[in-house]
Amino acid sequence: MSINCEILDLKSKPTIIINTKIPQSRLDETKKNAYNTMYNYLKSIGKHNESEFFIAYKSMGIENLDVDFGYILENEIESKNEIMKDELPSGKYVSGTYSGDYNKIESVYEELMMYANEKGYETLGVIYEIDVNDQNKEEKRLKLMLPLKNKSKF
């Protein structure tokens, strides 16, 4: 598996999120509910066409995933109920776009981490998967991003 890796230097972007801690077995169901809740909120304020859906994995335990489901927005909007305003932090990220079998994505993350290491960076532990599907294509496409810090020299 090989993807084109790159180091990005991003400015912060406003987001809305629903944070949850769930077992991995409930991920798909919870994701669908969170997205529907946020999409309906965005639609009610006329912002549903200017956003990208993402998942931020903050911890990867099988029985206790700490996950933010969210939308990246063009402009900040207010929180509502369990929907919280947040941001995609500024900084350096290693990034690549993945198309294919989701069950094989772990090797892509390993490739991104190796690339970052070769360029003098360490990953910070959060994994972002941004849905970049083209409505005209059936294959799922994800932009993968891992925030970075410079390697310590010791």
Image (cartoon, rainbow, N blue to C red):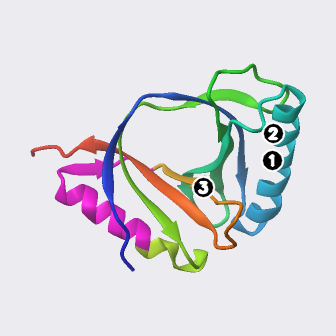
Tag 1: amino acid: Ala
Badges 2 and 1: C-beta atoms under 8 Å apart? yes
Disc 1, SS: helix
Instruction: Kindly identify which residue carries mark 1.
Output: 34
Query: Residues under labels 1 and 3: Cα distance?
Result: 18 Å
x and y percent of residue 78 in the render?
75, 19
Q: Could you say which quadrant of the image residue 51 lies in?
A: top right
133 in the magenta segment: no
Farthest-out residue, left: 154
Residue 82 position (above or below residue 125): above
- Seen at 16% across and 43% down, the residue is 152
Residue at horizontal 49%, vertical 67%? 98
- Nearest the eye: 53 or 139: 139
- Residue labelled with disc 2: 38
Residue 132 is tagged as: 3
Please count the marks in the image.
3
Along the line of sight, the residue nearer the viewer: 142 or 151: 142
Label 1 vs label 3, nearer the camera: 3
- Majority secondary structure of the magenta segment? helix
**Is 112 part of what is drawn in magenta?**
yes
- Residue 81: x percent and y percent? 85, 27
Residue 113 vertical placement versus 100 (above, below): above
The image position of residue 153, as x and y in percent, is 10, 44
Mark 3 against mark 2, which lies toward the viewer? 3
Q: Residue at x 36, y 75 (%)?
A: 2
The segment highlighted magenta reads 108-125
- Horizontally, residue 6 falls left or right of residue 84, namely left
Q: Secondary structure at mark 2?
A: helix
